[in-house]
Image: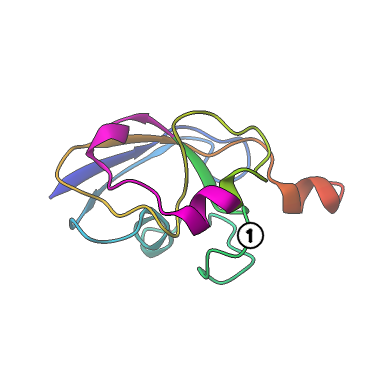
Amino acid sequence: MTKLTFLPHPERCPDGLEVDAEPGETILNVALKNGLDIEHACEKACACTTCHVVIRQGFDSLEESDENEDDMLDKAWGLEPDSRLSCQALVADDDLVIEIPKYNLNMVSEGH
């Protein structure tokens, strides 16, 4: 099992969350399965950036993003070198520390 640590987020998980995951699961599915509601407006189709996360530890253990994900990430609010779409990033064997950005394009456009 791989340990995923989600850093505290003021709305999504104020206390943070630490869970176990099976390699091969997406970060988003692990989060949702454990009660952490990461927004995913396109329903996991890699067609938006609402599930954007930043991998603070363990980024190099993830498979590289494909061209479609890279094109979407270019549109993400607060993009960083270690950003991924959680609907596309598959958990591997190394533990991950994950930050959910304070905003995403959906929240910004809706005035949250």
Left or right placement of residue 17 versus residue 54 in this view: left
Residue nearer the viewer, 67 or 25:
67
Q: Quadrant of residue 24?
A: bottom left
Q: Which residues are magenta?
A: 55-71
Q: Is residue 72 above or below residue 101?
A: below
Q: Is residue 47 magenta?
A: no
Identify whether 8 is placed above or below 93. Answer: above
Disc 1 target residue: 48
Name the residue at 14% across, 44% down.
93
Q: Which of the two residues, 33 or 47, is positioned nearer the viewer here?
A: 47
Mark 1 surroundings: few (<14), some (14-19) or many (≥20) residues within 10 A: many
Residue at 20% from the left image edge and 48% from the top image edge: 92
Q: Give the vertical position of 55 relative to 69 (above or below).
A: above
| Disc 1, SS | loop
Instruction: From the top left corner, tell me how far across and down residue 50 is, in percent.
Output: 62, 54
- Seen as rendered, the residue at the extreme front is 67
Residue at the far right in the pictured view: 111
- Which residue is rendered at x = 60% and y = 34% of the image? 79
For the point 26% across and 51% down, the residue is 91
104 with respect to 44 (left or right): right
Q: Amino acid at mark 1?
A: Cys
